Amino acid sequence: MSTTEQPMTPGFEVDPAAFRHLADAQVNVELDTGDMILNMGPQHPATHGTLRLVVRLDGERVVAADPVIGYMHRGYEKLTEFRTYPQVTTLINRIDWLSSFANEVPFVHAAEQLMEIEAPPRAQYIRTALTELSRIATFLLFLGEMGLQVGALTPAFYGFRDREHVLNLIEAATGGRFHPNFNRIGGLKDDLPWGWIAETRNVMKIVLDACDVFEDLVVGNEIFQARTRSIGIIPGELGASYGVSGSNLRASGVDWDLRRDGAPYLAYPDLDFRVFTHPDGDSFSRYWVRLQETRESARMVLQLLDGMPAGPIMAKVPRIIKVPEGEAWVETENPLGQMGYYVVSKGATGPFRVKIRSASFSNVSILPWMLRGVYVPDVVTILASLYFILGDIDR
Amino acid sequence: MADLATLTSRITDALGDAVVDQGEARGTLVVRVRPDAWRSTAEIARRSLGFDYLSFIAGIDWMPAPVVGLVEGDTSTPAQPSDMTFGVGGSAGRFQVFAHVQSTAQHTGVTFRTDVDEADPRVESWVSVYPGADWHERECWEMYGFVFEGHPSLRHLYLPSEFEGHPLRKDFPLLAREVKPWPGLTDVEPMPGGDDEAGEEGAA
């Protein structure tokens, strides 16, 4: 796709001469081994939604790949221009539907910045805790499902089982399992229910145990390593120029996490946490980084519960929200990567233009480069290890 | 912020006379450059200034959208002001394209912006500098009709290939709203207590 000449994925430069004797041994040597076009998707278990991948094959090897997106395009950027600010949060819940709460935060922040109000500390802490719980829920699904893609059924059940506890917590606090719509401009809809903090402590123990199980069961598994090590390598510099972000970029050795390095937001400056990177940039390192980040998120939630301040959960805002004229760009570290909203306001009750920068869109745009030269079964593990949500690509 | 001032002078020094204007949008630096320097801006940003990460490229249409079915006094419809005003850095006309690049090592970012001619919407492509610009420019092309010169294949990204029109332009109607106007005031339940000083009081 790009005009510049790119090298093939390292580890796949095979000398054809070494395999000539195999070709001679075949019966049908005279048969044409020309290219074949294979359609993967739009419905494919390795894609969360409807991603169609047109791959040109030479035997088992991918020569070129072209992702076809748009099967789920809902035109949110247009729809936001016809809605008021509180109505927009309902829409953006559906962008990355596995971590809806984390989607709302940057948009609400952008509106708050333009209105020059700030949510009270307790609201900031609850927002941070729910964002991290969304991250845990999203990653637990990944940790289980990635096993499924290499043929291991058990991790998928463990992943779904333990994610259920986290979803229950989100539901108890917000009333919605997948689409909380809990953020308000200036704070939150409700305070935490009774007993939530104690229950969350218990669940975080379960999550930390689950991480140990995944470490033993999947990371230490010989077959898993054989299927993922040095498969689908993203060089850090190239990944950044494609806009690959989040855990995918950190797995390529780029030490960049917006929670630590971006403009300070939520309660992250108060927290003590580690940012994990892996030098390899392959499917295995993406799994490893997400596993460590799940563990770190559970520790962050425990810190947040310890330091949870008392006080109001809503700042004083007018009943009809009019956002003053101006522009704001707010970016956050979402489970899938950098999520940002560029909000342009002209002083009305609704935004004039909202550019939604979603993580999966850029993460997937590197696929034509990545898939060149890999084998068909590895396409599935690469798709799974990139971890994208179609709603986050198509918006 | 002292940081922002240093960043501004670094960028404007490197870009030289390509800079038309600059400003700040809530802590984010916005630099407006000449349209003929759009591609060289990207090259300088990536190679000399260290902005290795492409966040997004997008378009904007500053024309006010025609308002459909607006009832007098109905504040539930987000009606925009009817005069054309421009954002940070100003604009020569209706269309602009803006892009955000960041540095993963220095943890800074900047939004570049340039004007696009309305009669002949052409912009230089960034694909040869940031390969990730490919999809962003395809999206911008189908949504706004900007032609990115030097892009290898401007094909539809989201919409079907036979789609006509550019949906994110302000004069492209949202058909759902044309067919059935926003319910607006008729759909609003009265607030408990029956007060009508809405918009003045702070919410509890």
Image (tube, coloured by chain):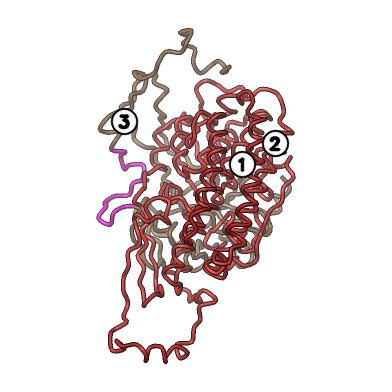
Q: Position of residue A138 (x, y in %)?
A: 54, 46
Q: Nearer the viewer, residue B125 or A378?
A: A378
Label placed on residue A70 = none
Question: Seen in the image, is B164 located left or right of residue A17?
Answer: left
Quadrant where the N terminus of chain A sits is bottom left
**Crowding near the residue tagged with mark 2, few <14, some 14–19, many ≥20 C-alpha atoms within 10 Å:** many
Q: CA distance from mark 1 to mark 2?
A: 10 Å
Q: Position of residue A225 (x, y in %)?
A: 57, 66
Q: Which residue range is magenta in the image?
A: B159-175
Res B9 quadrant in image: bottom right
The disc labelled 3 sits on which kind of residue? Val
Tag 1 secondary structure: helix
Label placed on residue B68 = 3
Label placed on residue A132 = 1
Residue drawn 72% across the image and 47% down it: A273
Q: Which residue, given by chain and number where applicable, does mark 2 sit on?
A: A304
Query: Magenta includes A334?
Result: no
Residue drawn 67% across the image and 59% down it: B105
The disc labelled 2 sits on which kind of residue? Leu
Q: Main secondary structure of the magenta part?
A: loop
Q: Are marks 3 and 2 on the same chain?
A: no
Residue drawn 45% across the image and 91% down it: A17
* Chain coloured brown: B
Query: Magenta includes B169?
Result: yes
Does residue A391 lie above or below A130 as drawn? below
Tag 2 secondary structure: helix
